[in-house]
Image (cartoon, helix red, strand yellow):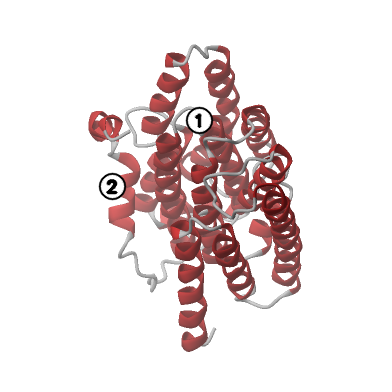
Amino acid sequence: MNPLALSLILTTLLAGTLITMMSSHWLTAWMGLEMNMLTMIPILMKTTNPRSTEAATKYFMTQATASMMLMMALTINLMYSGQWSIMKMTNPVASNVALMALMTKLGSAPFHFWVPEVTQGVELTSGMILLTWQKLAPMSLLYQMATYTNTNLIYLSGLLSILIGGWGGLNQTQLRKILAYSSISHMGWMLIILPFNPTLTLLNLAIYILLTLSIFMILANTLTTSMSSLTLMWNKTPAMTIMLMTTLLSLGGLPPLSGFTPKWLMIHELTKNNSIIMPLTMATMTLLNMYFYMRLIYYSSLTILPSTNNMKMTWQFTNTKHTMMLPTLITLSNMLLPLTPMISMLE
């Protein structure tokens, strides 16, 4: 892509997200979401082929439908209350429709069907932006709506997201689809804790973005997109294999890694509010995700690609890709657990 065009697109993407995050007026927030949506389409079609065109079309149609639903909710709210403030949406129909529109934009169940398809059809870098940066704007709106949203709808969507995110990823061999289902599952955790403690939702989002960025950067650096190519990773880049292994365990929420922090604090918050069945169900369903993360670790470090010759080493080409941000991201993705007491004080 032309560097000038790319810089213009990325600047517009950044501006759209910031406009939405800083808005207290529904119309400007909606405009920011539209800017986000329209700049994502050329990012998804960075390499022009039928699959990326199909992915961009699916993305556009889903997001345009969600934007239309959101505008309808805002219009209903305006008719009943006469104001545009995000913090006050008095009409229950309007708030439910707005909630469903934002869930569609986030890709949480039962509005999740576009996420694996779109992620699989695009490049790794485009998929990385789709599964990380694109979550910021809708989540900032949900954070502001936390006081008056329909909690039953949020719990239903959250539990469904965790279940579908675990179940859907079990039978996948493509890494982008696995990460898409992982994203759906994490959205479920963020939604469920939203009515109890919105700050924990933001903490979970921040750590999820760190972990997903790390994994996508490792995969982009090693040019790995499927499980079969993952089997060659241990003899080409052993250091990257160890980094991928620890980051996947952190994404699964195992102690003593960073991914355990939000899960620990969220389960603590739910039990503090006399909700015992909910965190138990969530933790049990997350074991499905843990299974396919362990499967990826097994493929990357303990298996050899089947071939007819006896030589298991591949040609050692000089890697021209830069990994400037990767050490910082890996450190943050794995070593934040000791900061948990300080994080819990900030709630």
Quarter occupied by residue 39: bottom right
Which residue type carries mark 1?
A: Ile
Q: Which residue sits at x=71%, y=64%?
A: 55
In-front residue for pair 253/294: 253
Q: Relative to 241, is 98 on the left or the right?
A: right
Q: Which residue sits at x=33%, y=49%?
A: 330
Contact (CB < 8 A) between labels 2 and 1? no
Query: Which residue is label 2 attached to?
Result: 331
- Of circles 2 and 1, the one toward us is 1
Q: Position of residue 108 (x, y in %)?
A: 65, 42
Q: Quadrant of the N terminus?
A: bottom right
Q: Position of residue 160 (x, y in %)?
A: 68, 31
How would you rate the neighbour count of disc 1 (Cα within 10 Å): few for under 14, some for 14-19, many for 20 or more? many
Q: Earlier in the sequence, mark 2 or mark 1?
A: 1
Quarter occupied by residue 282: top right
In-front residue for pair 69/87: 87
Mark 1: secondary structure? helix
- Is residue 8 visible in the rendered structure shown here? yes
Q: Quadrant of the C terminus?
A: top left
Mark 2: secondary structure? helix
Q: Which residue sits at x=40%, y=20%?
A: 268
Quarter occupied by residue 32: bottom right
Q: Position of residue 159 (x, y in %)?
A: 64, 28
How would you rate the neighbour count of disc 2 (Cα within 10 Å): few for under 14, some for 14-19, many for 20 or more? some
Query: Which residue is label 1 attached to?
Result: 193
